[in-house]
Image (tube, rainbow, N blue to C red):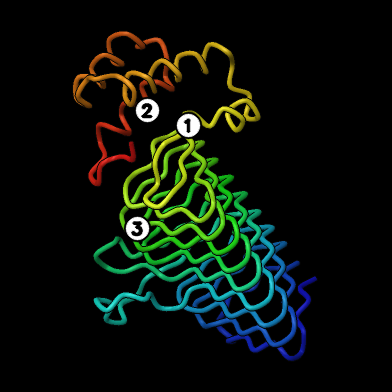
Amino acid sequence: MTRIHPTAVIHPKAEIADTVEIGPYTVIGEHVRLHPGTQIAAHVVIDGWTEIGEGCRIFPFASIGSIPQDLKFKGEKSQVIIGKNNTIREYVTVNRGTEPGGGVTKVGDHNLLMAYVHVAHDCRIGNRVILANAATLAGHITVQDDAVIGGLTGLHQFVRIGRHAIIGGCSAVAQDIPPFVSAVGNRATLYGLNTVGLKRHGFSDDQMTSLKTAYKILFRSKLSMKDAVKKIRDDLSHSSEAQELAAFVETSERGVCR
């Protein structure tokens, strides 16, 4: 059965599924939907048009669904959509989207948002992402599946973080971080492949070899980026990961870290 502490303040129109737990002094707004098995601790605020999937755990003093910190926002209806089995730790903030950005801030499944993480308006976070303590995402950022962002790291608006990338702590990221790589610094620079992370996720020796070759072509040869992408297309057509890396670089609008 749903367990709601008597001090919680819940709007009568909020949709609270069976088996949801809500702790003391938590506030749930009118347009919120909470799916089964989600646990909301004490002193949490969930507002706006916010949907939270099954099996999430939200820790004290998190704020989800508040209006964006964007001066262009004029009070329009916008959403936060959070998937299932996410862990959202203390003081995390996830803001609603804006009309120019599509109106939705989205978090996928099985993510870990550690304490003090900020996810700004219109961000898109994939699945199995780790955002370490006080990682700060500006608006319109995309973080693809299985990426790891270190603590106290700031990401510029509109940046993309590729799949299986890892960013070291205390970094400042102003350009896209390609998939499968490691980066750190202010401003962030690349330091090769995310070798440890890729092995932990079961990448084969052949996959690793192809990615190493593609990385060298892109970032350690004297080829222009356009010519490097073409060489990967021609020479590594058998490797879906190398093709993914090339496509990410080719479609970058902010440019990629080097």
Identify which amino acid the numbered label 3 is placed on.
His
Which residue sits at x=19%, y=24%? 224
Callout 3–callout 1 Cβ contact below 8 Å: no
Residue 202 position in % (x across, y down): 63, 24
Left or right, 120 with reference to 169: left
Seen in the image, is 238 located left or right of residue 205? left
- Residue 139 in percent (x, y) is at 35, 63
Amino acid found under the numbered disc labelled 1: Phe
Kindly check if marks 1 and 2 are in contact, taking CB atoms under 8 A apart as contact. Answer: yes
Q: Nearer the viewer, residue 43 or 132?
A: 132
Image spot of residue 55 (x, y percent): 69, 58
In-front residue for pair 228/170: 170
Q: Circle 2: is it few (<14), some (14-19), or many (20+) Cα within 10 Å?
A: many
- Name the residue tied to disc 1: 180
Q: Secondary structure at mark 1?
A: loop
Task: From this view, report whether residue 54 is shown above or below residue 213.
Answer: below
Residue visible at 20% across and 19% down in the picture? 227
Mark 3 vs mark 2, CA separation in Å: 21 Å
> Which is nearer the N-term, disc 1 or disc 2?
1
Using the image, determine if residue 170 lies above or below residue 164: below
Determine which residue is flagged by label 2. 245
Which amino acid does the dot numbered 2 rest on?
Leu
Circle 2 sits in a helix, a strand or a loop, which is it?
Answer: helix
Are there few (<14), some (14-19), or many (20+) residues within 10 Å of tag 1? many
- Say which residue appears at 72% left-offset and 74% top-offset: 41
Q: Is residue 40 left or right of residue 205?
A: right
The residue pinned by badge 3 equals: 156
